[in-house]
Each structure stands twice: as C-alpha cells, then as structure tokens.
Image: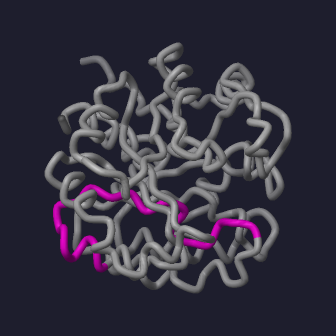
Amino acid sequence: MSEKPPTPVIDAHLHVWGSPFPNRPFPWTPDPFPIEDLLTVLDRHGVSSCVDVTPIMYDWDNSYGLQVTSDYPSRLRIFGRFDPFAPEPAERLRKWMANSGVAGVRLTFYGDDLRRLDDPSALEPFWSAAEELGVRVAVFAPDALWKIVAVIEQHPKLRLVIDHLGLGVYPGCENPYANFVALLEFAPFPQVLVKISGAVEVSRDRYPYKDVQEIIGLARTTFGANRLMWGSNYPVLLSTCSYEQSLAFVDECTFDTDERIAVLGGTCQRMLAESEKSL
C-alpha cells in the first residue's frame, strides 16, 4: 500500500500588489511586490501554495489579485475586498465567487470603517446573503470583535474566518490584545476558522515570541488545531521578522504532529475545497 502523500504547506494569509496608484500610496512600501517575487519566497521555503488577501489600499479593486490567481492557478487563491454596504450583495457575491481561484471575501473594520460596525445589522442584507450562499467571509475587526460575535449569533451558519487571532495587528494600535477574549466566543460555531497570522507582529518578545505562544496555546485548546491555520502576513511582517521565522515559529508552539499538519496546511486546504462547493 502506498503512503498517503504529505499535506502541503499553505500560507493562508499574504499579499501581493503591483504598481501603486498615484492617489493611493501603499502604506508599507512604495515599491511593487509582484507575484514573481512572492513565488521565489514560497519556493525557497517549501510552501506549495498560498491565499492572497487583497491589500486595503486597493479599495474595492481586486483586479491584480484576480489576474495573478488566473496566471498561477495551482499556487494562489484569493480573498478579495468586498463592499458589504453596496446594494444587491447576493448578486454581487455570486458574480465574485464565479471568478476562477476565488475563495471568499474579506472585510476590514478599523480606523474610519470602525464606526460602521456600531450596529452589525447595518450590514444587512450582506450577512444574510453570505450565510445563505455559504460564502466564506474573512473578518479583521480587532477593535469591534464583540460586534462580530453578535453577527454570528444572529447568523449561526455564517462561514467566518477571524483574521490575526482577532489581535490589533495594525500600526498605532495601543493594546493589540485588548479584545482577544472575544475570539473565544466563536468556539461554539464549528464552521468558524481562525488564522494565527500576524501574531508575531504584536509580540512583546523576540523570537520565539513566548507571549504569543501562550495566546496560540489558548486558541488551540479552545478551537482545536483543525480550526486554526498559519498565515505569514508577508511581506508586511518583514518589519518584525523574516518569512523563515514566521514559518519556524509554528514549530515553537505546542502542536503535535497531526496538529502541525492541520495548522500548516490541512485546515486551509479543507477551507479552499469547501469554497469550491459553496455556489
């Protein structure tokens, strides 16, 4: 009997971008970070594929991500930025998910957008449409995570991904850990997944980031490794650590062999397979 092939390593959260827009400068670097540079990094570290998350500076323009996902279908999938306040969300979600390589949508709520989560029902009918269609929604709302808890309680079948462990992974956040306790409230909803991406960026320690290991250990106990997935947040994380350290950090955590397989690829692989059947 032949051995089962190993689960590939998948980076569940990173970014690529082309040339910046003159009226929308990139917050991390003025230089492009094209797909060709990314593939070199992935190949160097034995990462088979990844999920591109459209950077916030692109507003609602996902064209670069769609193009590179189409060009390299075996290497990339995409979570695109999506306006939940625009009309006819169900029709727009169907159209978006029909694109090759699309795995879901991503919402970000911090800064000026935070005020729009004062009332989660203000995003209706988006939440209802996403729940009904089974579209996976990645959410980054570290300062309003309790608002997202209210959403999942109203829409218990909604397929969410909580980005960055719910931590405040953004410049100027005074207390990145402030709302971490809200993350634990998603445990009763088995379809909700959690990325451990970005965690090393808010660590108060040097590698191997002992303080963040404690938080990830709590997430592991609460959700189980089959609901956790590693993402590098590359290249944004380079101000904190290298890609190699981000990947090696997983081995510093208390995952056993099967858990490590899940975190480094199995959970993401399952999520991506589910997204192909959602519509």
Report the side of 70 relative to 184 (left or right).
right
**70, above or below 208, in the image:** above
Question: Which residue lies at the image location 45% right of the left edge and 72% below the top edge?
Answer: 116
- Residue in the picture at 46% in, 35% down: 78
Instruction: Give x and y (percent) for residue 109.
Output: 52, 67
Residue extending farthest left: 132
> Is residue 163 or residue 120 the one in the foreground?
120
- Residue 249 occupies quadrant: bottom right
The image shows residue 31, relative to residue 114, as above or below, that is: above
- Image position, residue 225 (x, y; %): 39, 59
Residue 164, magenta (yes or no): yes
* Image side of residue 177 versus residue 5, left or right: right
Relative to the observer, which residue lies in front, 225 or 158? 158
Q: Does 94 lie within the magenta span?
A: no
Q: Quadrant of residue 120?
A: bottom left
Relative to residue 64, is residue 133 drawn left or right? Answer: left
Q: Which residues are magenta?
A: 150-171
Residue 211 in the image, given as x and y percentages of width and height: 67, 77
Query: Residue visible at 50% across and 72% down?
Result: 217
